[in-house]
Amino acid sequence: MRKLTLALLAIIFVYAGCDLIDGTNVVNPDLTLDNAVNSANSAESWLTGVERRTALVMNSFLTTAELSTDNYINRNTFFNQNVDGGVIRSIDTDIENTNFQFARLRNQASYGINTVIPDNDSDAAGTSVEAELYFYLGYAHLLAAENMTSLPAEGNGVPQGPAAHFDLAIGAFNQANSITADPSYNLALARAHYGAGNKDQAVQFANAAINSGSADFVRYINFDGVNGPGSTYENAVYSRQSFNDLQPLPRLDFLDPKFGDLGGTNISPIPMLKMEEAHLIIAEAHLSDNNLNLAKATMNDVIGLVDSRPTRAIDETQEGRIGNPGFSQRPNSAGFVVRADPSAPFRDGLILDRTATTDVPTISGTSVTTDRVDALSSGTDALRTLYLLRQEIFFGEGRRMFDLGVRWPVSNVEALNNPNVTGADTEPVIPGYIPTPYSTMDEFSADFDALEVTIAVDMNQVIADQRGNRFN
C-alpha cells in the first residue's frame, strides 16, 4: 500500500509552466508528500511512479510524433489534424501536453535523486534505484533533445536547445552507468552521443552495449490495462481499426500495427531502447569513415538480429481499408508491389492482405535483405539504405521525427508563464529539404488494376542526399 501511495503521488507530481504545484494541500492525509516520502522504501516507490510517468509521456507524444512524419497519415480522426500538413502549432493540446510531460518526467526523476533519497531514504543511495532515477532523468532530457526546438531544463528556466539537452542527458546516463552496470545505460549513452554527433563516444558505448552479453536486449515502456494508463498509440493504430482512418505509408504497411492487441487486459509494451540501435550507430560511423565494406557487414548484423525477432498474428479483418467518404481506397492486397519513388524499382511483400489474420513484427521488422546490402556500391546508396533500416526498425516508436530533423516548439502555455521564452522557441523546426507541401511525404498513387503503388518521394533518399551522415 505504501508503494502504491507514493507511486500515485509521483504521478500527480506536476507543475504549471514547469513549476511545482504544492502537492500537500490535499484532503486525504495519507496522500501528503511528507507522509509518503517518509515511508519505508520511499525511493523505490517513487521510482515506480517515475516509471509509470514514461507511459504517460508516450501517450502525450507518440501518436502525434508518428503523424508528424512520413510513417503515418491521419485520414479522418480526432488525433491532431494539422501535423500531417506541417502545421505544428505551439497552441495545440498535444504539443502542450508533450512539453509538460517531458518536463514532469525530468522533475520527478530529479526530485527522487535530490530530495527523496538524501532526505528520506539514504539506503537507496548508490543502489540500482538511484541509478534508475538518473536514467529517467537522462531520458527526459534525451526526448527534449531529439524532438524539441528548445525546452527549459528547470522550472521557469531559459529554454535550452538540443545540444544542451543532449549534454544533460549524457551527464545523467553517465551517473547511472557509474552506479551499476546495465545494457540500458550503454545504449542510452550511445543514442545520446549519436544525437549530439559525437562519433567516437557513440561507437564506444554502442560496442559496450553489444559486448554486454545481451545480444537481443530490449527495454520497454509498459502500460497497465487494469489500473492504467492504457496505450493511446495502440488505440490509434489498432483498437480503432474499423474506422479505417489512421494508416501507414504503403511501403511500411507490413509493419502495422506493430503494437496490436495482446488479449484480455494486456497492452503491448513499446520499446524504449533495443540492441538494433547499437549496430545502426556503428554502421553509420563506418560510412562516415568511408568504409563501405564494414558498414555493409554491420548492416547485415542488424538484419540478422531483426530477422530473429518475434512476430504476432494480428486480426485486422474489420479494417478493410475500403476508403472513408472523401478518401480513396487504400491498397489492401498482398499482390500489390510498391516503389519508394517514381524512379525506384517495384518491390513485393510490403503490403499485407487485411482480409485475413496477418503476422506483423512486435519489436523490429525490415524489408531490407542481406542481398540488397551486399549489392550496395556507393556510400550514398548505403546511407539511404541505413535510414530505411532505421525507419523500419524504429517504426511506431517516435524516432522518425529526429531522423527527418523536424522539431516541435515550446508550448504557448509555457510561453505565457515563463518570461524567458522567446518567439523563436515557440516555432517548430522544419528543414528546407522537407518537401513542399509537407504533406507530400505521405502521398502515393495506386493503380488498382496493375496492383502497383508509387510513393511520391523517398525521404530516406532525401536524407542521404541533402542532410547526410549524422557524424559528418
Image (cartoon, grey):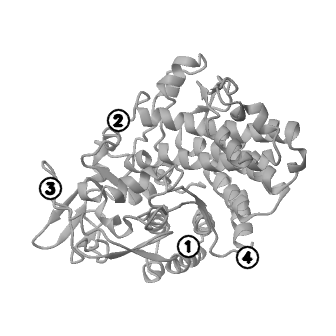
Task: Residue at 50%, 23% (x, y): give it.
Answer: 413
3D distance between C-alphas at marks 1 and 2? 38 Å
User: Are dots 2 and 4 in contact, CB under 8 Å?
Assistant: no
**Label 3 sits on what residue type?**
Ser
Q: Nearer the viewer, mark 1 or mark 2?
A: 2
**Which disc, if any, is residue 292?**
1
**Label 2 sits on what residue type?**
Val
3D distance between C-alphas at marks 4 and 1? 27 Å
Among the 4 quarters of the image, the one containing residue 118: top right
Q: Which of marks 3 and 1 is in front?
A: 3
**Label 4 sits on what residue type?**
Gly
The percent position of residue 230, horizontal first and vertical second, equals 48, 52
The answer to whether residue 99 is above or below residue 386 is above
Q: Name the residue under label 2.
A: 87
**Which disc, if any, is residue 213?**
4
Which tag, 1 or 2, sits closer to the chain's start? 2
The answer to whether residue 60 is above or below residue 177 is above
Q: Is residue 340 visible?
A: yes
Crowd around label 4: few <14 · some 14–19 · many ≥20 (10 Å):
few
Residue nearest the viewer, comparing 364 with 127:
127
**SS for dot 1:** helix
